Amino acid sequence: LLTAESTALYTTFDEVLAKHLNDEELNQLPLTLGEAAMEFLWDFLSYQEGPRVRDHLSHGEMNLNSFPKEIANQMLAFSIVLLHKFLGDDHIALKDNAIIGPLISCAGCYRSQFHPVARLGKQVLDCAGSINRWDQLPIPSLEEITGSTGAVAESASIPETLEVLCLLKHRMPPDYCFLEDTGHSHLTDWWLSLLTNLCTTPMRTLYCPRPVLEAVAVLRKITAQCHLVSEQIIASAELRYQQWIGKVLRSRQRHNYIRMLKSITFLSPVLRLLLIVVALDWISMSGICKKATEYQQYLKYLKSILQYTENLATYTSPEKNKWDETLDLSRKVLIKIKVYNEKRQACLESTMQINS
């Protein structure tokens, strides 16, 4: 197997796939192969979360006998499509072939699976699936917890949740803009459908500008922290319930468990709303990052949300169990989201008036 050596000079795939050549001339390969083909090559050869076939093979890190069959099949299929592309008109009839025709069609609409922008969409849906499990968590009956004290009210909610939701309405797809009649049910009944709609939107990822990649990196950290919070709450709720029915919880632990259950009543819509914010920003990322001053404000805003999710992950961890503090923490971040989106909407309306 031929591998990379420090004693030889190579033209690497980084150079082959780059937007510009070393002399700053525009690389003609993307124009020749097309965007879908370039996405495939970046996915399988270079992106850090992809198979990184180039790295593993060129550095002798992969045993060809154990090379994944699925990856081999996809690369073989792609090679056939490329071969057909450059065979010329004499072989145009191959398009009607029962095997090659569908391969050509699929390759023409390929979308990146491993670019950070694409991974963010998958992360949001994975996190949504985790939060959706909260509805099935086992809990004691109301009779069992009647009379228990806690700093959070039984029907705890944060008014800013719905206020932020209403501010986001104009950025949602038409089918999801009827918030007046749905209230908090929009964060349950239609929530997963909305996120699926947003996160399956085709996104252009080839040669993303650096500001977009920076913002996406923060959004991914926010989503990861939300997922961590969700998984911690699921694990704690399931464990505490088993201890509750086994009557092995001490008095202080029972009160803490009740506080956790009450905290879930407002944390659920807050985390669902945060994922909507992330998804809406994801599909409008290119527009957000165009102006330098606005972008810096946006990045600062995102980092404040990240700080909230990191603190929330700490408070909801088994070691801390600071459930009472999560209410004030959540209210503060929702106010920040509300203020930022109010300013954003005012700027948008002002720009529209000037243009008209």
Image: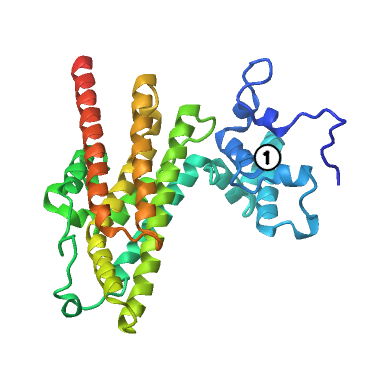
Q: Quadrant of the C terminus?
A: top left
Residue that numbered label 1 is attached to: 82
Q: For this rendering, which residue is in front, 41 or 264? A: 264
Q: Quadrant of residue 139?
A: bottom left
Q: Position of residue 128 (x, y in %)?
A: 37, 56
The residue lying at 68 percent from left, 39 percent from top is 82
Camera-nearest residue between 13 and 334: 334
Work out whether 131 lies above or below 289: below
Image location (x, y in percent) of residue 2: 85, 42
Left or right, 227 with respect to 140, comes to right
Q: Residue at x 43, y 39 (%)?
A: 218
| Residue 209 appears in view | no
Q: Amino acid at mark 1?
A: Leu
Total count of labels: 1
Secondary structure of the residue carrying tag 1 is: helix
Crowd around label 1: few <14 · some 14–19 · many ≥20 (10 Å): some
The reply to whether residue 263 is in sight is: yes
Left or right of residue 153, residue 78 in this image: right
Tell me if residue 33 comes above or below residue 72 in the rendering: above
Q: Is residue 16 left or right of residue 331?
A: right
Residue 61 higher or lower than 208, as above or below: below
Estimate the x, y position of residue 120 in percent, counting from the top left.
45, 45
Indicate the colouring scheme. rainbow
Above or below 205: residue 131: below
Q: Quadrant of residue 286?
A: top left
List x then y, in percent, for residue 55. Answer: 72, 43
In the picture, measured across the screen, residue 101 lies left or right of residue 134, that is: right
Going by the picture, which residue comes out furthest to the left? 181
